């Protein structure tokens, strides 16, 4: 090595303080970015909690809305909570079996080309904006038949299907092949192997995936707007043949109002919705981590 | 004797007998029907949206896409204004969210103490779980007023010579509020995908760079970023898709006005926001067909972006698989 290049290397080494400073700066920025994300979450949750807690009482889920409420009659959103329960429950009934069957087909039966094709269809479905799903169901069912809880549930089911299928595929892939082989070697037919050996192993994963999907669609507003929001009235309905009020749509409508009392009710409903979603997420993630390590340990 | 179907995954189904069992056939048929139904659903969505927008399509064809008008009185409808608003808000949100998200991902994979990683990862994912209507409620009642009273006047007086930072609107609804709300919504998506990508960078490459005397940042720039580049592009596309399709939070904070202007502090509208805002008022056929046309534009965007993201992921996986050698990367 010549003296010249040695000097150059030495000069480059001279840049070390500057390189260290750049490194420090970048590390600082990364810390800052993480801090900002956590701060945003904190501010949003705190805003909802502080404003919602003041207006939160039992009336919110037991009383129905009172239009033009001048006499301070106790009012709430009982109709919205009932409607959300019905619509999300129906959506789960529609999406859960189909989602599991799609996952079983992809993981246990399909040849690679079909697996890719159906997987792509699920990804595309997952990428379709919720508002477009709303317009789709509007064109499919609502035009001519009117809005209904069924239409809203079908729209939510379209959103749930790829979520349930994806999470089920993930846990099915974790089931060790030795288990399938052992069952088949004992002469158990494939369908019984799948239904009574493979699927029970994944039960925990399917439950967490479904619960997370429920938490996700319970907060969806866009697909409901065009399918179950107009003419919902203020009474508690359980019949999905009619358009039913839901919690997210109620929050949406109250937030557009100019009346501070409506805003207070919107915050309280948002707090209930947010608590539900956060608790479900927390529990589901803890359970998911546990069941995953259990299936993994069985390997 | 050869199996009739040699392409079947042999490890998945050992001992495939020739005797067809009724139960097997039944389960395979039912599950196959479900898979078919899921695929047909995608086609049905496309078909229904195209069918219902035909009236607007035959009325103004592709001219609808660029026409800047939404006039229910004169029945003149066009997507131009909303297309501009969607592009402006989602691209700005992506530009704000991407560096933040990459910073978060670097923090979570390279910098944070081990005991901090799991809780902060969970918190970032919790941010993604907040419903858009709650973010929108917060945006219109808390964030909007703060931006209007503090941030927007400051930016206007300091950087007012840039057309983006014009005179603030008086209501608190503004394109800028929508941009901030969208940034918050796509931040956790891009961050959690980037985090997984960074976790996938082979340890020996990173340690090799550090052993050569690079600083941590130089290692990130020289090893982590090139390795994860394609994946980050895919994550950005997914984030952009989410920003373009977000309807509720945007319609709550953006102010719903028609027109093209560069002033971020004034009101505007987006494709998805316009659809959501019209859910009660759409009565006449031309307006409904025009709304469905807006949905069609959104659907085309989302299809293009889903396929593009998939394509990038596949290509990256194949290239990295080749780079590491057969069987190197799953």
Image (spheres, rainbow, N blue to C red):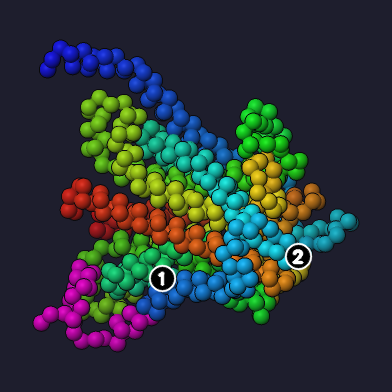
Give me the C-alpha separation between circle 1 and circle 2: 50 Å
Q: Nearer the viewer, residue B317 or B54?
A: B54
Dividing the image into 4 quarters, which one contains the C terminus of chain A?
Answer: bottom left
Q: Nearer the viewer, residue B37 or B301?
A: B301
Q: Is residue A118 left or right of residue A277?
A: left
Residue A298 rendering spot, x and y as whole percentages: 27, 59
Residue A60 rendering spot, x and y as whole percentages: 72, 57
Residue A5 rendering spot, x and y as whole percentages: 18, 16
Element class at badge 2: loop
Which of the 4 image quarters holds residue A8? top left
| Residue bearing mark 2 | B74
Which of the 4 image quarters holds residue B168? top right
Q: Residue at x 65, y 49 (%)?
A: B260
Instruction: Report the magenta residues as a range.
Output: B1-30
What secondary structure characterizes most of the magenta part? Answer: loop
| Residue bearing mark 1 | A100
In this rendering, the label closer to the viewer, 1 or 2: 2
Element class at badge 1: helix
Seen in the picture, residue A289 relative to B176 is either above or below; the reply is below
Dividing the image into 4 quarters, which one contains the N terminus of chain A?
Answer: top left
Q: Residue at x 42, y 66 (%)?
A: A122
Seen in the picture, residue B19 relative to B235 is either above or below; the reply is below
Residue B285 rendering spot, x and y as whole percentages: 69, 73
Graded by Cα atoms within 10 Å as few (under 14), some (14 to 19) or many (20 or more), the crowding at tag 2 reads: few
């Amino acid at each position: 090595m010549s003296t010249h290049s040695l000097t150059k290397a030495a000069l480059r080494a001279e840049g070390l303080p500057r390189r260290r400073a750049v490194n420090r700066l970048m590390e600082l920025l990364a810390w800052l970015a993480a801090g900002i994300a956590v701060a945003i979450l904190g501010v949003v949750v705190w805003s909802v909690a502080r404003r919602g807690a003041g207006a939160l009482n039992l009336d919110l889920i037991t009383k129905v809305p009172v239009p033009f409420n001048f006499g301070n009659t106790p009012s709430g959103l009982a109709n919205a909570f009932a409607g959300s329960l019905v619509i999300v429950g129906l959506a789960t009934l529609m999406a859960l079996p189909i989602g599991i069957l799609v996952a079983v087909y992809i993981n246990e039966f399909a040849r690679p080309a079909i697996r890719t094709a159906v997987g792509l269809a699920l990804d595309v479905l997952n990428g379709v904006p919720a508002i477009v799903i709303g317009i789709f169901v509007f064109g499919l069912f609502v035009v001519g038949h009117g809005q209904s809880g069924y239409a809203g549930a079908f729209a939510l089911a379209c959103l749930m299907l790829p979520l349930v299928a994806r999470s089920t595929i993930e846990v099915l892939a974790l089931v060790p092949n030795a288990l399938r082989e052992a069952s088949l070697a004992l002469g158990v037919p494939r369908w019984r192997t799948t239904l009574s050996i493979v699927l029970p192993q994944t039960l925990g994963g399917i439950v967490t995936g479904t619960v997370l999907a429920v938490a996700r669609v319970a907060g969806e507003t866009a697909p409901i707007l065009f399918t179950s929001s107009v003419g919902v009235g203020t009474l508690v309905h359980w019949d999905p043949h009619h358009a039913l009020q839901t919690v997210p749509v109620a929050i949406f409508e109250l937030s557009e109002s100019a009346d501070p009392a409506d805003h207070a009710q919107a915050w309280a409903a948002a707090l209930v919705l947010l608590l539900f979603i956060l608790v479900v997420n927390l529990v589901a993630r803890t359970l998911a981590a546990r069941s995953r390590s259990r299936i993994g340990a069985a390997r | 004797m050869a199996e009739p179907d040699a392409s079947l995954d042999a490890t998945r189904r050992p001992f495939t007998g020739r005797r067809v069992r009724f139960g097997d056939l039944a389960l395979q048929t039912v599950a196959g029907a479900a898979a078919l139904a899921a695929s047909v659903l995608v086609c049905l969505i496309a078909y229904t949206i195209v069918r219902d927008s035909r009236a607007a399509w035959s009325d103004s064809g592709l001219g609808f896409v660029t026409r800047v008008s939404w006039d229910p009185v004169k029945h003149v409808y066009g997507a131009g204004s909303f297309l501009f608003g969607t592009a402006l808000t989602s691209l700005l949100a992506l530009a704000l969210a991407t560096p933040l998200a990459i910073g978060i991902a670097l923090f979570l994979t390279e910098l944070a103490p081990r005991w901090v990683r799991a809780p902060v990862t969970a918190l970032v994912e919790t941010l993604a779980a907040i419903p858009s209507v709650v973010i929108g409620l917060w945006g219109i009642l808390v964030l909007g007023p703060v931006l209007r009273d503090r941030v927007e006047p400051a930016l206007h007086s300091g950087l007012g010579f840039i057309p983006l930072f014009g005179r603030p609107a008086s209501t608190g609804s503004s394109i800028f509020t929508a941009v901030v709300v969208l940034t918050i919504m796509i931040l956790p998506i891009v961050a959690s995908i980037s985090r997984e990508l960074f976790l996938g960078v082979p340890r020996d490459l990173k340690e090799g760079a550090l052993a050569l005397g690079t600083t941590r940042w130089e290692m990130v720039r020289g090893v982590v970023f090139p390795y994860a580049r394609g994946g980050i592009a895919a994550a950005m596309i997914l984030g952009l898709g989410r920003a373009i399709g977000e309807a509720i939070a945007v319609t709550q904070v953006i102010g719903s006005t028609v027109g093209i202007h560069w002033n971020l502090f004034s009101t505007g509208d987006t494709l998805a926001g316009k659809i959501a805002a019209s859910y009660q008022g759409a009565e006449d056929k031309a307006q409904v067909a025009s709304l469905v046309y807006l949905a069609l534009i959104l659907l085309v965007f989302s299809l293009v972006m889903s396929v593009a993201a998939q394509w990038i992921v596949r290509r990256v996986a194949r290239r990295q698989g080749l780079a590491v050698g057969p069987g190197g990367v799953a």
